[in-house]
Image: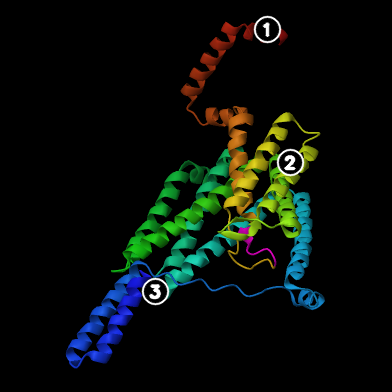
Amino acid sequence: MTELRHRGATDKELQHQNSEDKGSETEGKERDGASDNETKSDSGVPEVPVSADDTPEVLNKALSGLSSRWKNWWVRGILTLAMISFFFIIIYLGPMVLMMIVLCVQIKCFHEIITIGYSVYHSYHLPWFRTLSWYFLLCVNYFFYGETVTDYFFTLVQREEPLRILSKYHRFISFALYLTGFCMFVLSLVKKHYRLQFYMFGWTHVTLLIVVTQSHLIIHNLFEGMIWFIVPISCVICNDIMAYMFGFFFGRTPLIKLSPKKTWEGFIGGFFATVVFGILVSSNNPLPVLRLVFAECFYIDLGTLVTLQDFANTIPGHGGIMDRFDCQYLMATFVNVYIASFIRGPNPSKVIQQLLALRLDQQLHIFNSLKAHLTEKGLLPALEEAA
């Protein structure tokens, strides 16, 4: 596509220099202009501006005598300690605060990724992209949080009539909200820009899949117990810190071209440091947690291998919020799959919730079936004698 642009520009220059007929020159410019517009609508993606340095002025003055390499080391180290302290504080404040923090981080990560798309989309003055992106974020969060509230707070929901109605028709309402957004997208389509608009529509949905779905899995893991939140996040933090330190002091061999600052030395050093950290953390914990830690060590390094940097410059020395939480999102998915595959069994409270939602004749039928089953197993007479 770039060659086509250069070719079009060359053609226009030759026409301007050699053409004696103004009419044919005008036609040539219009034809080339139409070709350029079509090429622009189909492909041209302007570069995203590089974020400015947002390092606090206090740190800039204190570290002014250091080289850029060591300045980045100190800035990154100081802010890492600050983030770890904040991590301990929010754990102390409890699960509800943690869920609010997860939601805030989700919104910021979504904003960083959508902003990249918006800088492309806005350059063509096409309507509604940002509005629709945030609308779909609202719809997806309504769906996921509604499902969570219904599953884990069923008794509370059933007490309030408005909540009970919203819970009963939750999925239908969610579908109607999404369908409304899709209709708004169709109405926003502009002729000759269909490809770009569908590209950005896909961009929004992939962002929702990566950010919202996986952040919601973090909340699901929280409901399984704080250990499924603390251990995975601690392992990711350890891997990030140790990979950076090994890479800083010993890094010589580039890891991948997509992220030139990563090295094989940092990759391998972070892996083994996380294994040691995992053994120490799980020494007094059940075997499933130990197995999870070892699996995490492999999965964290895979996540480190494929994730990029510089979504934004929200945290000086670290990049954007998404740069800090990309592996956390991948880890949340892995932990949720691990729990569902190896840990979680049938949940009696959910079974009772479903039974209470049935009609009385259905409840009676299940009661008789369960009574017959327990009698056949020889458990019911023993229970009756004990009573």
Mark 3 touches mark 2? (CB < 8 Å): no
Of badges 1 and 3, the one in the foreground is 3
Label 3's element?
helix
Residue 296 lies in quadrant: top right
Span colored in magenta:
317-324
Of residues 103 and 109, the one drawn nearer to the viewer in this rendering: 109
The answer to whether residue 81 is left or right of residue 164 is right
Pointer 1 local density, CA inside 10 Å: few below 14, some 14–19, many at least 20: few
Of the numbered discs 1 and 2, the one sitting upstream in the chain is 2
Q: Where is residue 309 in the image (x, y as percent from the top left)?
A: 60, 61
Disc 2 residue type? Val
Disc 3 residue type? Tyr
Q: Name the residue under label 1.
A: 382
Label 2's element?
helix
Which residue is at 73% across, 72% downward?
Answer: 68
Pointer 2 local density, CA inside 10 Å: few below 14, some 14–19, many at least 20: many
The answer to whether residue 122 is left or right of residue 330 is left
Which residue is at 47% across, 23% downward?
Answer: 362
Of the numbered discs 1 and 3, the one sitting upstream in the chain is 3
Of badges 3 and 2, the one in the foreground is 2
Q: Name the residue under label 2.
A: 275
Q: Position of residue 367 (x, y in %)?
A: 54, 18
Q: Position of residue 95 (x, y in %)?
A: 70, 47
Residue 324 in view in this figure: no
Cα distance in 3D space between marks 3 and 2: 49 Å
Q: Mark 3 points at which residue?
A: 124
Of badges 1 and 2, the one in the foreground is 2
Residue 123 lies in quadrant: bottom left
